[in-house]
Amino acid sequence: MSYVLFAILAEARKRFVQHILTILSFMLKVTYTFFSAFLFLFLAGTRPWQSEPSQQYSVAARADSLRNASEWPEELIVTNFSSADLTPSPACLAVAPTGEVYVGVDMIGSLGKKPGKGSIVRLVDSDNDGKMDRHTTYAMVDNPRGILPVGDRLYVLHTQFSKETGIASGMDLVVFEDKNHDGMADGPSVPIIEHISSPKFLQSRGTDHATNGIRMGIDGWIYIAVGDFGFHNATDRSGKKLTMLGGGIVRVRPDGTEMEVYTHGLRNIYDVAIDPFMNIFARGNTNDGGGWNIRFSHQIQSGEYGYPVLFKHFTDEIIPALVDLGGGSGTGALFMDDDTWPANYNNVPMMADWGRSQLYIHRLSPDGAGFTQKEEKFIKLAQITDVDIDASGRAYLSAWDGAGYSGNASKGFVVRAVPNNWKYRPFADLKKASVKKLTSLLKSGSGVARLAAQQELLTRPANKTAKPVWKIVTDGKLPLAVRVAGLYTYAQAAGTDGIENLVTLTSDKDLQEFALRALADRKPKLSTVPIEPFLNGLKAASPRVQIAAAVGLGRLGRPEAAEALVQVSVPGSFAAPAIGTEGPHATPNSAIIPPHIAVRSLVSLHAVDACVKAIGTANSTIALWALRYMHDPKAVAGLLNAYQRTNDETLKKQIIITLSRLYKKEADYDGSWWWSTRPDTHGPYYKAITWESSADIKDFLTKEWSKSADKKFFVDLNSRHRMEIPEFGAEEPVAVKEEIKVDLEKIRNKKGQIGEASIEDVMLAMAKIPGDAALGKTLFTQQGCIACHSLSKGETMKGPFMGQIGSIMNREQIAESILKPNASISQGFSSVLITAKRNKSYMGFITEESASKVVLRDITGQVFTIKTSDIVSRKEMETSMMPSGLANALSYEEFASLLSFLSQQK
């Protein structure tokens, strides 16, 4: 940009800001009546208290005014890396080991539906001075949700739209290549997995509960965060098809084969963090008041986490989360593994929360097979969406920054974060690196460097790489993370030829867990893997080794494993919540993990015979637990026979409970329905149906009911399992709640509809209801908005001026600011608390600031001039003065009318 043009724009910006200042002042953070705070809306992009020189304006000075994080630890330096002119609406990002930053620009957003507005932008800091100086559009893709650079390849997960109709047809994981390194994809992408989100709900809602982030573990798998749209008949490169009802984690090999479910029972996770030892962590998403709040969880292979049908009333059957964190919206995730970072911020999972505009750290403490945790704030960034790091220790974070639910061309930015003492260290050109150099990089203190080196080694001949890598694995003096990286590299390079060596590692107490995982990792290669190391591992003192063995026995698929699995002990904490109560589904329970995983493996083996045989023995509890999921006539017959053989009344009761659970089963999922944002959480099934043995179970239960003196026991079972057997009596059956087409004409005038619906549903409705601006004007007065907001220049300025709000925010942005007032308080427009000498405090909005004074206006319109020498402390308030929920009593029509009125104020 020329200096003249720059100066013209600067002068225009100055005049615009001065004009706004004559009509605009802001509200104080003080106690005031509920009705008086209705429309606390925040602007973005300028700092009105800072004067801008028109002729002396320089690029260097402008850098200080670029959007940035608002808080970070003093040990770090955080600076703007790109702005909305290049990276608007950044939904995700990923960083190559060599530092190239790939940003997923999503101008469709979570609720938009028009294609052609997305891209992957590649940003480069070629001289490593912390400033982006080159950029290219790498590829055009819609709704990018996950990006993963691996060598010359770039994996991208995004929505596909039909070229003929312009309607969403699904989501695919694809791979691009850039072999000539010009920063642009060489050609069209190649699909790795197709249809990994159900198209029906992408079409009706948008990409808001769809499939999201992708990360690669040191085991070489690509892990995919699946939202609770789930998917039907996702297809990998080998033609394998997979269906999943609800959310969880799916993984696939980089060549697009061996797709499989890793964990299940999550709501709407956006990403995963993976540590050097293949511990996986996720930060979930709240179900809008339905009991499933933001939760941080440790994801263990084959585990069931319970959303939505098990977590409340069948808590004994799930792996609980590590903590319930309340409201928010979990987004990007990263496990920080880089020795250039301060020890206090290294070796920790970092989890972004869009709703709280915060990157969090979770301090982990080992606890048996799991962890306990402590959350702490780390970096505050406006609606943060993602975080990643390169092999030199440069971390990058993307900010949605109020881009709304359908994207915004003027919102969004990326920042860079490095330690104070950080120095750039070049990363090797891996294509030119020798095997010796690559194996030395496996010893790096950077997890990114180790993974990149591994992936390059796997492109070289195994007879050249296996031996030097094996030396790393067997060197007991190296850090465990390095040895584990070597182990997984060796396992992938050597394939079946490495099985014998891996078996020897199961005798090494430090590597036993990882050797077992690697031995059972690839189902097509398991035929020659011996079972004995897993049977031994099941008896190990380490709970982590026990679960690695249990997972492996399920994956080996050998029936003889069942006898060992049913011997896994079940702790006393295995107890169903009492009728009408909610279990501890977000409290760590490490003791439940080994039997839980053993049960999942028994189910995978379909070990009916072994479980039936164990009924009435010391292993009855785990056997009956596993039988709950085996809808097989042989299982029902075995339970009935066991009931007739025993005289133990307690055991008989447990058999009845198990048969009651088996009376119905979950209907096969065909992708035609979804359970909405606030599903029925009663459980144990969502769309329950009877099956071929239901009649036999009903006959048995009815006979036992007729003979029993404890009729309430059967009533409770009828309610708990929703069998709907009329003879028993129970609560009224609840119809399956699905995402259905809303008849807006019927409900648009229903009072309180705003409070009853999720914010996403409200935004979808507002896009269809124009509203009546005249009614909106009346509501502006009736709702008390006028008490804090003025519409004309002649009125006293108190809170935000609404006379020009329509020229600053569009209709969607106004709606979001009312519904979620704390979601995006733009930098420079938040309220400030100033403590001054002589025990004076001031709360309000800074309208002018210089080296000698600060001018602040409070809610009443009163102006205070405070000498900077008198200021003791100054704190920017994190929350809006406007409480959330003030529009809850309105109907859709009323809210739409209010929005229409406000959007006309220009």
Image (cartoon, rainbow, N blue to C red):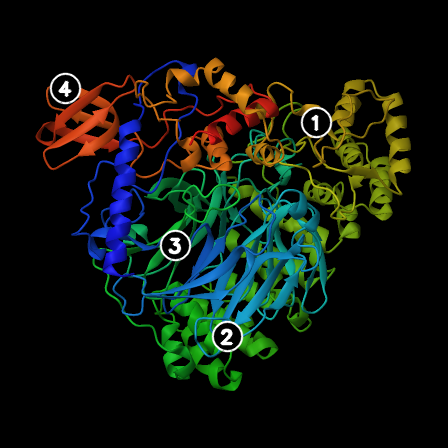
Secondary structure under tag 4 reads loop
Which of the image's four quarters has the N terminus?
A: bottom left
Mark 4 burial class by Cα count in 10 Å: few <14, some 14-19, many 20+: few
Find disc 2 in the rendering and name its residue. Answer: 490
Q: Quick check: 700 above or below 779?
A: below
How far is disc 3 from disc 2 in space, using C-alphas? 45 Å
The numbered mark, 1 or 2, whose residue comes first in the sequence reads 2
Q: Which mark is residue 839?
A: 4
The numbered mark, 4 or 1, whose residue comes first in the sequence reads 1
618 relative to 583 in the view: left or right:
right
861 relative to 628 in the view: left or right:
left
Find disc 3 in the rendering and name its residue. Answer: 85
Residue under the point 76% across and 38% down: 687
Q: Amino acid at mark 3?
A: Asp
Q: Are marks 3 and 1 in contact (CB under 8 Å)?
A: no
Observer-side mark, 1 or 2, equals 1
How far is disc 4 from disc 1 in space, using C-alphas? 57 Å
| Residue 669 shows up from this direction | yes
Residue under the point 57% across and 22% down: 894
How far is disc 1 from disc 2 in space, using C-alphas? 63 Å
Observer-side mark, 3 or 2, equals 3
Find disc 1 in the rendering and name its residue. Answer: 745
How far is disc 2 from disc 4 in space, using C-alphas? 67 Å
Q: Are marks 4 and 1 in contact (CB under 8 Å)?
A: no
| Residue 823 shows up from this direction | no
Mark 2 burial class by Cα count in 10 Å: few <14, some 14-19, many 20+: many
